[in-house]
Image (cartoon, helix red, strand yellow):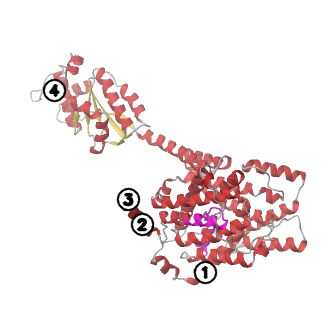
């Protein structure tokens, strides 16, 4: 136990911030502070919008952006990552709110945070690199569609219908709108979204999101447009930390949603950190430390009424583009949002919900990289299939199931492609020192096959069928030096093939078995079968010479004076007469 606790302590120490982080934060204060201010301006409407979309309210989004944003900035594994509420997490939270209520979401966030810390201690961050690109692209496309559909009720100015499936809620919102149209809300949403999309393309350095939200709020207030429903009252400050929401008896029923939230938080945060690395030179995140920082952030956020948080790709990208060089920028963004919470809550409460819906609609549109989707769709049919299935599963099921489905399909197709590389090719016998007449005589009774590629469960049975169709010869030589890998299934199939050929009176000799593959063959008895008959050789010429000796002993070809006698077993004597 002491050793275990000692290892945990050493691992925790490695995950904590060090002097290097502090030194980097002092390097260029002005640039980082300016970047943090810019990100805060971009993050404010997103935090409010995602809080509203989650079902816990705008104050929950702000609390998450402040608390989780600050902790993830300090303890995370990326110098450039900006964390907070995200659209992907909102997609997962909506059905949890519908089934378990706000307290269930807070409990799930707390549990997910603990799981993320455990993943960091287990060094699970490195496995993110095994998620295929088509899964990530399909996942992102599906999220963008869901985020856009989630905004339909507020964009149409109708109360959010009941339901935890976004397609059902969208349809019900459209039905409500046809009965009582609210064109004011539609105009606000479309105007905000259009300005953001067009403005971002023409002047990407200008924070159009906050500017257009301010403009929409002023217009709604001056014109007295009551149809543009505002956010509503917000608390002037963060609530005191509390565990009053925690119901120990409900932990069992919330375990599955907590696993889903933790998986999504890990996936999105590590993906966002990787994107940040790719946008800079000399920056590289620590995946395990990033999981640790996100875990602490998600443990703390629910105590203040915040929703689960992840690394936010859009805000992280803004942070990088505005020149951030250290984690001070993300920390500054959280501090500025905290000031807004305490000083400007009455003003923020007047923002029309339709304007926030327009911000998130534009965000969903900008998430879709058309060029990347086209490239992935043109790459291979398998990549296109994985992308489409993952996107549809994200839209119809949920994000975690979508990723699992995408990974399963990708894994199956990858195994299929690898299995196709396994080949059984007939090759001519090496002539060696034999004369032309002797070589022709040997070739009449001996056939040699070379196994190329992996011999594992996905390819082994096809190999068996091919080998079982060997013509009526006396000896089969299997050249195995090019077998890249072999598993228990492949070894069993090889043994089965040897036994079937032996029962037909065909001797099987092998050459070139690698040392790394001997254990697998030995574990299923395949190696012992060959050894017992004396039919395993290091090289192909030795195997051919052994086959010649076997044929001489069987009386098939005339004996060679220099050849040694072949050891014939009782079974061989019966088959060759």
Residue that label 3 marks: 1
Q: Name the residue under label 4.
A: 567
The reply to whether residue 119 is visible in this rendering is yes
Q: Residues within 10 Å of mark 1 (few under 14, many from 20)?
A: some
Quarter of the image with the N terminus in it = bottom left
- Can you tell which quarter of the image residue 491 is in? top left
Residue 310 lies within the magenta run: yes
**In the image, is residue 391 above or below residue 106?**
above
Upstream in sequence: badge 3 or badge 2: 3
Nearer to us of marks 1 and 2 is 2
* Residue 38 inside the magenta-drawn segment: no
Residue occupying image coordinates x 56% and y 55% = 263
In the image, 262 versus 125, the foreground residue is 262
Q: How far apart are marks 3 and 2 (CA)?
A: 12 Å
User: Mark 4: which secondary structure?
Assistant: loop
| The label number, if any, that marks residue 33 in the structure image | 1
Q: Give 161 or 247, whichever is nearer the viewer.
A: 247
Magenta stretch: give its range.
296-322
Residue 9: mark in rendering? 2
Separation of residues labelled 3 and 4 (CA atoms) = 58 Å
Q: Which residue is drawn at 35% across and 33% down?
A: 492
Q: Do the residues labelled 3 and 4 touch (CB within 8 Å)?
A: no
Residue 376, labelled with which disc? none
Total tally of numbered discs in the picture: 4
- Residue drawn at the location 69% of the way across and 71% of the way down: 239
The answer to which of marks 3 and 4 sits earlier in the sequence is 3
């Amino acid at each position: 136990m002491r050793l275990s606790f000692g290892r945990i302590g050493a691992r925790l120490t490695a995950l904590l911030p060090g002097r290097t982080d502090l030194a980097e934060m002092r390097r260029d204060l002005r640039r980082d502070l300016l970047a943090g201010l810019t990100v805060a301006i971009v993050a404010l409407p997103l935090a409010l919008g995602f809080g509203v979309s989650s079902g816990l309210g705008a104050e929950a989004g702000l609390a998450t952006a402040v608390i989780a944003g600050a902790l993830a900035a300090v303890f995370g594994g990326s110098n450039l990552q900006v964390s907070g509420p995200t659209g992907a997490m909102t997609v997962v939270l909506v059905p949890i709110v519908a089934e378990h209520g706000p307290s269930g979401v807070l409990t799930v966030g707390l549990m997910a945070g603990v799981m993320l810390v455990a993943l960091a201690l287990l060094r699970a961050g490195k496995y993110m690199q095994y998620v295929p690109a088509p899964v990530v692209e399909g996942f992102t496309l599906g999220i963008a569609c869901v985020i856009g559909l989630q905004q339909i009720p507020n964009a149409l100015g109708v109360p959010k219908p009941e339901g935890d499936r976004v397609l059902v809620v969208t349809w019900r919102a459209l039905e409500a709108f046809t009965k009582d149209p609210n064109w004011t809300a539609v105009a606000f949403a479309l105007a905000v979204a259009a300005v953001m999309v067009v403005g971002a393309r023409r002047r990407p350095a200008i924070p159009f999101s906050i500017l257009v939200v301010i403009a929409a709020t002023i217009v709604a207030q001056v014109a007295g447009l009551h149809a543009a429903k505002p956010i509503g009252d917000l608390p002037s400050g963060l609530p005191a930390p509390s565990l009053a929401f925690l119901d120990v008896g409900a932990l069992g029923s919330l375990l599955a949603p907590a696993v889903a939230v933790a998986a999504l938080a890990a996936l999105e945060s590590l993906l966002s950190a990787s994107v940040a690395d790719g946008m800079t030179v000399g920056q590289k995140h620590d995946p395990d430390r990033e999981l640790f920082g996100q875990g602490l952030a998600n443990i703390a956020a629910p105590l203040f009424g915040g929703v689960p948080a992840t690394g936010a790709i859009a805000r992280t990208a803004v942070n990088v583009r505005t020149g951030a060089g250290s984690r001070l920028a993300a920390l500054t963004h959280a501090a500025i949002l905290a000031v807004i919470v305490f000083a400007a809550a009455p003003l923020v409460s007047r923002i029309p919900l339709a304007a926030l819906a327009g911000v998130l609609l534009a965000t969903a549109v900008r998430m879709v990289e058309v060029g990347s989707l086209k490239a992935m769709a043109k790459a291979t049919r398998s990549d296109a299939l994985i992308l489409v299935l993952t996107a549809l599963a994200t839209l119809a099921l949920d994000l975690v199931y979508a990723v699992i489905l995408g990974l399963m399909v990708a894994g199956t197709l990858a195994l299929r492609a690898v299995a196709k590389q396994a080949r059984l090719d007939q090759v001519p016998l090496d002539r060696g020192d034999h004369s032309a007449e002797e070589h022709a005589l040997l070739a009449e009774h001996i056939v040699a096959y070379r196994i190329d590629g992996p011999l594992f469960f996905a390819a082994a049975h096809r190999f068996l069928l091919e080998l079982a169709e060997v013509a009526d010869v006396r000896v089969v030589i299997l050249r195995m030096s090019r077998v890249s890998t072999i598993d228990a299934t492949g070894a069993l199939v090889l043994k089965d093939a040897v036994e079937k050929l032996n029962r037909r009176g065909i001797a099987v000799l092998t050459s070139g078995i690698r040392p790394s593959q001997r254990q697998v063959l030995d574990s299923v008895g395949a190696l012992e079968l060959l050894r017992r008959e004396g039919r395993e050789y290091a090289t192909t010429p030795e195997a051919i010479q052994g086959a010649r000796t076997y044929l001489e002993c069987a009386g098939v070809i005339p004996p060679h004076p220099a050849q040694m006698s072949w050891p014939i077993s009782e079974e061989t004597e019966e088959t060759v007469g």
